[in-house]
Each structure stands twice: as C-alpha cells, then as structure tokens.
C-alpha cells in the first residue's frame, strides 16, 4: 500500500513540475521576445480584419442577389438611416452614392463607408490619412480600396469592387 502511494505522489510531483516548467517557459518567452509576440498578434488581428471584410462583402452581395428582382441598385441593405450602395454586379461601392450609374468607389471616403458599414460597430478605427494609431484607406487610380494598418508595415488589404475580391497581400 505504501509503495502505491509513493509512486502516485512521485507521478503527481513530475506532473506539477512539468506544468511549472511550461508556465516558466511561457513567461520567459513573453518577456524575452515581447516585440515579436506583439508583432505576431498585430499580424493576426489584421488577418482577422481581412477575413471579416471578406465575409461582410460576401454577405452584402448575397443580400443583393436575393433582392435582385427589385432592379433597384441603391440602398438594398439599410442599417438605421444608412444604406449600402451596390454596383450592378452586386458589390458594395459606398453609402453616399447618388448616381445610379456609378460602378465603383470614386473617393477614399466611399472606401471608408464600405469599411464602416460592412464591419459594423466592432471595426478598427479608420482614417483617410496615415496615422500612428489608426488604420487608413487609400483609393488607387484603378478604383481599388487599399486598407493599411499602422502596426503592420508590409501588409495591405485590398478590395476590388468590380469583382468583390478582398485580398491580403504582403
């Protein structure tokens, strides 16, 4: 009986020692490679934002296709007093479009409107100029919305309103 208690205590001791080593290793990793961990977390956050935008664009287009029979391309998805505007292929182009013939965002403001509407209230803050703390957006000459993070230098998020493609590039 005494030998079974001793072996159980010994196994428990090794188990606790193993847990302790994992905790000490994790804490020392965080303390020694703190900047690397923060960079990885920021890259993951930017990737999750890209996924959320991609899914939001997909949802918006799905709503458009369901309501296509109305043949009304403006404000098919309304949230409060704001309506999301679509091009004729069903991809978002902004929320303040008054010209029904407009097929893509014409200004960075339209890109910002897409971001705000599609990502909703939990979106990262977005500005029209480069800022130290906020995401910012630019509209290319090809009318592609390009979203950038202040914390992830090499990556950018692009939205092509003509195809609905959302891509994260380095």
Image: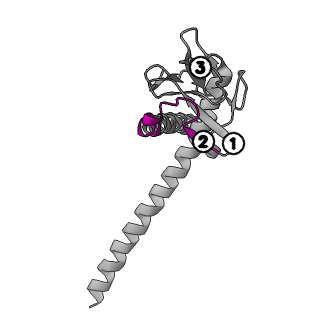
Which residue does the image show at 60% across and 41% down from the upper left?
A: 78
Judged from this view, the residue extending furthest toward the front is: 70
Read off the residue under disc 2.
Answer: 78
Which quadrant of the figure contains the N terminus? bottom left
- Measuring from the top left, give residue 162's x and y in whole percent: 46, 19
- Give SS at disc 1: loop
13 left or right, relative to 136: left
* Residue 105's disc number: 3
The reply to whether discs 3 and 2 touch (Cβ–Cβ < 8 Å) is: no
Magenta stretch?
A: 63-79
Disc 2 is placed on an element classified as strand
Rendering quarter of residue 62: top left
The answer to whether the residues at label 1 and label 2 have Cβ atoms under 8 Å apart is yes
Give the CA separation, mark 1 to mark 2. Answer: 7 Å
Closer to the camera, 118 or 47? Answer: 118
Cα distance in 3D space between marks 3 and 1: 20 Å
Q: Nearer the viewer, residue 164 or 133?
A: 164
Q: Is residue 16 above or below residue 65?
A: below
* Residue at (50% x, 33% y) in the render: 50
Measured Cα–Cα span from mark 3 to mark 2: 18 Å
Tag on residue 81? 1
Per the rendering, the mark at residue 99 is: none
Of labels 3 and 2, earlier in sequence is 2
Foreground: disc 3 or disc 2: 2
Residue 70 on the magenta span: yes
- Residue 55 place in picture, x, y as percent: 46, 38
């Amino acid at each position: 009986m005494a030998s079974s208690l001793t072996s159980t205590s010994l196994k428990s001791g090794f188990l606790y020692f193993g847990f302790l080593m994992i905790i000490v290793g994790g804490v020392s990793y965080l303390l020694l490679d703190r900047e690397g961990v923060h960079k990885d977390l920021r890259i993951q956050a930017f990737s999750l934002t890209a996924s959320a935008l991609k899914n939001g664009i997909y949802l918006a287009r799905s709503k458009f296709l369901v309501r296509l029979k109305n043949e009304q391309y403006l404000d098919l998805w309304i949230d409060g007093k704001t309506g999301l505007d679509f091009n004729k292929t069903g991809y978002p182009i902004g929320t303040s479009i008054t010209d029904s013939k407009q097929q893509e965002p014409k200004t960075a403001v339209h890109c910002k409107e897409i971001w705000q509407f599609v990502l909703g209230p939990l979106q990262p803050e977005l500005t029209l100029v480069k800022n130290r703390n906020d995401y910012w957006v630019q509209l290319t000459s090809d009318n592609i919305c390009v979203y950038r993070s202040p914390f992830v230098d090499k990556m950018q998020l692009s939205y092509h309103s003509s195809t609905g493609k959302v891509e994260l590039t380095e």
